[in-house]
């Protein structure tokens, strides 16, 4: 019956923990999906907004430039030097309106984008010297829209009106496009940044609420475990008293004594589990642990190694302590936690060690770390994998609370536990 009670208790604890872990994993997966969707929507919104902004700015910007170029003398003032230069070229080379190749040559040499020659309201010749150009500047390549900017040029055969355009406006449209694109991209990036900040802020609030709830749940669970352990200790103590009385009353009955010894062992096992549970609750709690004043390593753990040696020796184990050495270095520990650490390790050895193999205790010092290593052979029919592992978990957490660490390994049929304590200068 006691064995059934023990098994059911640990099944409850493991099942409860599994449900918590399962929910946490599912929640994390859902959160990642939500974050991906929010980020994707943020990028889409930013891209669409940037494109709309680009179009609006470009539309109004080109309108302003068009108005400026048509309402002012900008084009006229830029064209006059070219007309004068072309007039000199025509006069010096006695060029007529039919000498197309000659003034084509001059236009190319002076990097003219577009020009047209008119006489009596008719186009004598026009030519565009560029393959592509800014669409908003295309009007300056249309001779039908440049009448007010034509200027007289005297050719050798007659006087004609000439319009010369050397890309006076393109640079402004290009600058407008670059600035517009840069500003739109900046706004898009800013929108994504603000959106991500909003997402992060939202999850920070959720995280704080979740952490607060988890802390509350953890405290309630720790309180539950402590209460259960204390509540079970009372009937166990009473049960041990009744067993002792029964042993006294049945001293002559070897058969009953045998069964009573079995019951005693089972009760002690449950008591050990309760102690382990309390250790785990203490180690996993968020209550601050104060470390004692630094003392030499030998005085901090030496007595506990001696006590462990005595218990194992009494249980029939052979122990090798030849590699236990001491140096005058100090460590800062909590003696209460150290006591529970070695109590858990002693209990593990008693449960799972092979009595036919040596239990080895070693100490090691380097510049910053003091190590304690304990190794034992493992019984073929007993492995730590069959246990709940809560004892080693408790040791690990208690070592972390003291700024140390615990690790374990299997080597050549031996199970090794290593404790590391930082040396205090």
Image (cartoon, rainbow, N blue to C red):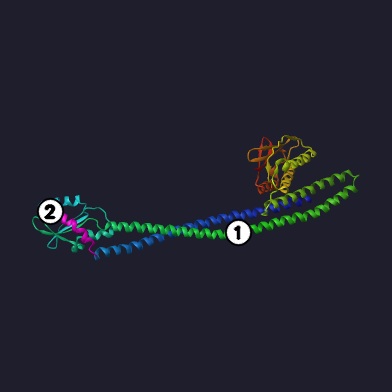
Q: Quadrant of residue 134?
A: bottom left
Please report the residue visible at 56 percent of the width from the left and 54 percent of the height from the top: 29
First in sequence: mark 2 or mark 1? 2
**Magenta: main secondary structure:** helix
Answer whether residue 389 is magenta in the image.
no
Q: Position of residue 410 (x, y in %)?
A: 66, 38
Q: CA distance from mark 2 to mark 1?
A: 86 Å
Query: Which residue position is annotated with label 1?
Result: 210
The residue lying toward the viewer, choosing from 322 and 252, is 322
Q: Is residue 29 above or below residue 349?
A: below
The residue lying toward the viewer, choosing from 251 and 70, is 70
Instruction: Determine whether the residue tagged by mark 2 lies in a helix, strand or loop.
Output: helix
The reply to whether the C-beta atoms of the residues labelled 2 and 1 are less than 8 Å apart is: no
Residue 231 shown left or right of residue 104 in the figure:
right
Q: Is residue 380 above or below residue 82?
A: above
Q: Position of residue 23 (x, y in %)?
A: 61, 56
Q: Which dot marks residue 90?
A: 2
Q: Give the class, few, some or many, for how many residues have Cα within 10 Å of label 1's Cα (few <14, many ≥20).
A: few
Q: Position of residue 83 (x, y in %)?
A: 17, 57
Residue 344 shown left or right of residue 240 in the figure:
left
As drawn, which residue projects farthest toward the top?
322
The boundaries of the magenta stretch are: 72-91
Please report the residue visible at 10 percent of the width from the left and 59 percent of the height from the top: 159
């Amino acid at each position: 019956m006691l064995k059934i009670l023990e098994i059911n208790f640990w099944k409850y604890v493991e099942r409860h923990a599994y449900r918590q872990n399962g929910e946490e994993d599912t929640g994390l997966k859902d959160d990642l999906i939500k974050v991906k969707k929010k980020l994707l929507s943020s990028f889409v919104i930013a891209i669409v907004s940037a494109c709309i902004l680009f179009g609006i700015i470009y539309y109004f910007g080109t309108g302003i430039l068009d108005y400026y170029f048509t309402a002012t003398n900008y084009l006229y003032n830029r064209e006059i030097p070219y007309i004068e230069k072309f007039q000199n070229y025509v006069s010096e080379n006695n060029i007529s309106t039919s000498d197309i190749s000659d003034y084509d040559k001059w236009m190319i040499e002076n990097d003219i984008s577009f020009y047209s020659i008119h006489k009596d309201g008719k186009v004598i010749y026009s030519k565009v010297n560029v393959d592509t150009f800014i669409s908003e500047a295309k009007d300056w390549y249309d001779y039908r829209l440049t009448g007010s900017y034509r200027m007289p040029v005297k050719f050798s055969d007659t006087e004609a009106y000439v319009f010369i355009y050397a890309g006076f406006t393109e640079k402004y449209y290009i600058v407008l496009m670059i600035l517009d694109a840069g500003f739109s991209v900046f706004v898009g990036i800013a929108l994504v940044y603000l959106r991500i900040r909003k997402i992060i802020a939202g999850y920070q609030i959720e995280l704080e609420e979740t952490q607060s709830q988890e802390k509350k749940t953890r405290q309630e669970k720790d309180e539950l475990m402590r209460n259960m352990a204390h509540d079970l200790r009372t009937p166990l103590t009473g049960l041990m008293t009744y067993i002792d009385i029964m042993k006294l009353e049945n001293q002559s009955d070897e058969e009953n004594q045998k069964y009573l010894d079995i019951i005693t062992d089972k009760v002690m096992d449950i008591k050990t589990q309760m102690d382990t549970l309390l250790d785990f609750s203490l180690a996993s709690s968020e209550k601050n642990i104060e470390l004692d004043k630094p003392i030499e390593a030998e005085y901090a753990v030496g007595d506990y190694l001696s006590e462990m040696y005595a218990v194992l020796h009494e249980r029939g184990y052979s122990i090798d302590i030849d590699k236990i050495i001491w140096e005058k270095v100090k460590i800062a520990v909590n003696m209460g936690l150290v006591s529970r650490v070695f109590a858990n390790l002693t209990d593990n050895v008693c449960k799972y060690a092979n009595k036919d193999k040596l239990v080895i205790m070693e100490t090691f010092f380097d510049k910053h770390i003091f190590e304690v290593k304990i190794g034992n052979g493992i019984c073929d029919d007993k492995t730590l994998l069959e246990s709940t592992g809560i004892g080693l978990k408790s040791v690990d957490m208690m070592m972390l609370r003291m700024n140390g660490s615990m690790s374990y390994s299997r080597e050549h049929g031996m199970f090794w536990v290593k404790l590391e304590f930082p040396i205090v200068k």
